[in-house]
Image (cartoon, rainbow, N blue to C red):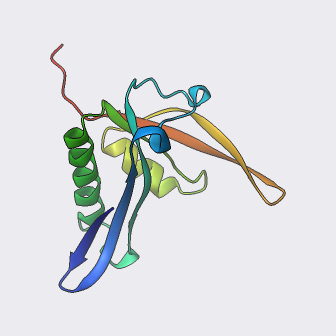
Amino acid sequence: MLVATVGRALVGYALLLFGPDGAPAPNLGVTLQRAGLLSKCYAVPEVHGKGVAAAILEAAEQRARERGVEGLWLNANADNHRAQRFYSKHGWERVGDIDFVVGEVVHHDPVFQKPVFQTDV
């Protein structure tokens, strides 16, 4: 878990999963061979637009590089268009969808991935 603070106040966090717990199901569209899961990435509304979320995301990507994975994947809430724009702006690519049931409601969330190592083309 990574945390962001301003002074003594917790203003954001990211939760990463590696190994079997972070592996994507084969039907999600993730093409990375060794991927970690960015399970959570949040910043409190008071710091939106101030670079905190971008710093958390960069720290998560750096942690993934340190762990030696090819990249990260995540699913975003289908109704959270702000988050989807944020991930796209920071180089994440939408690659598929994930369906899951909560109670009697089926949710269809977009899946994103991002390689964390630069490759020469």
Q: Position of residue 30 (x, y in %)?
A: 48, 28
Q: Where is residue 79 in the image (x, y as percent from the top left)?
A: 60, 56
47 over 32 or under it: above or below: below
The residue under the point 23% across, 48% down is 63
The residue under the point 30% across, 79% down is 10
Tell which of 29 and 80 is nearer to you: 29
104 over 10 or under it: above or below: above
Q: Position of residue 45 (x, y in %)?
A: 39, 75
Asked whether, in this view, residue 103 is left or right of residue 71, the answer is right
Q: Residue furthest bottom?
A: 8
Task: Specify the quadrant that holds the C terminus.
Answer: top left
Q: Quadrant of residue 43?
A: bottom left
Total marks drawn?
0
The residue under the point 28% across, 51% down is 60
95 over 74 or under it: above or below: above
Q: Which residue lies furthest to the right in this view?
A: 104
Tell which of 5 and 1 is nearer to you: 1
Task: Specify the quadrant that holds the N terminus.
Answer: bottom left
Q: In which quarter of the image is residue 53?
A: bottom left
Asked whether, in this view, residue 94 is left or right of residue 8, the answer is right
Q: Which residue lies furthest to the front in this view?
A: 20
Q: Where is residue 107 in the image (x, y as percent from the top left)?
A: 71, 50
Asked whether, in this view, residue 99 is left or right of residue 16, the answer is right
The residue under the point 23% across, 63% down is 51
Tell which of 87 and 6 is nearer to you: 6
